Amino acid sequence: MAVADRIGLPIAVHTESASPHEVTLVQATLEQSLLGERPTRLIGDKAYDSDTLDAKLAQQGIELIAPHRSNRNTRTQDGRVLRRYVRRWKIERLFAWLGNFRRLLHRWEYYLENYTGLVQLGCMLILLRNYF
């Protein structure tokens, strides 16, 4: 899981096994942040539509922007806030940049620590390419 800034550069990266749901990984990813400050807005897909996650992020001063699932009964966001959801392509671009590294794309590493190190190395290379 990753958090990117408004340009699409990585701010925080966290790796985990495939079994936990994305909502449970948000706090761990925000704790891995490279910056001292937290983001003011977090844009996610429909999997992030959770009242408990929204409440936890609101306590930290983070606004959650995620479209509602189709089975949601009470609507919590209006269309004005969801206009920012179109900017989600920037995080998808970050994952595409990470996909350019073949070792990350195929996940040849068996141990999570090794894979995490390679993901962090890929993020460092992306940051270096964009700043120099």
Image (cartoon, rainbow, N blue to C red):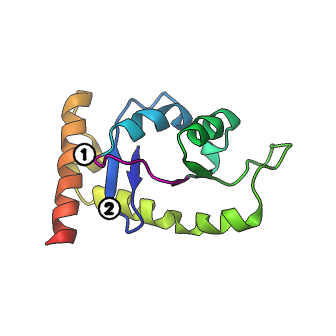
Q: Is residue 72 left or right of residue 113?
A: right
Q: Is residue 97 left or right of residue 80?
A: left
Give yes or no for residue 57 being in the magenta stretch: no
Q: Position of residue 80 (x, y in %)?
A: 72, 67
At mark 2, the secondary structure is loop
Residue tagged 2: 9
Numbered label attached to residue 119? 1
Numbered label attached to residue 16? none
* Mark 2 touches mark 1? (CB < 8 Å): no
Mark 2 to mark 1 CA distance (whole Å): 13 Å
Would residue 110 be seen by someone viewing this image from the given angle?
no
Q: Residue at x 18, y 54 (%)?
A: 124
Closer to the camera in the image, 35 or 3: 35
Q: Amino acid at mark 2?
A: Leu
Q: Amino acid at mark 1?
A: Val
Of badges 2 and 1, nearer the viewer stands 2
Q: Residue at x 17, y 48 (%)?
A: 121
Q: Is residue 65 left or right of residue 16?
A: right
Give yes or no for residue 37 being in the magenta stretch: yes
- Kindly report the secondary structure that dominates the magenta region of the rendered protein: loop
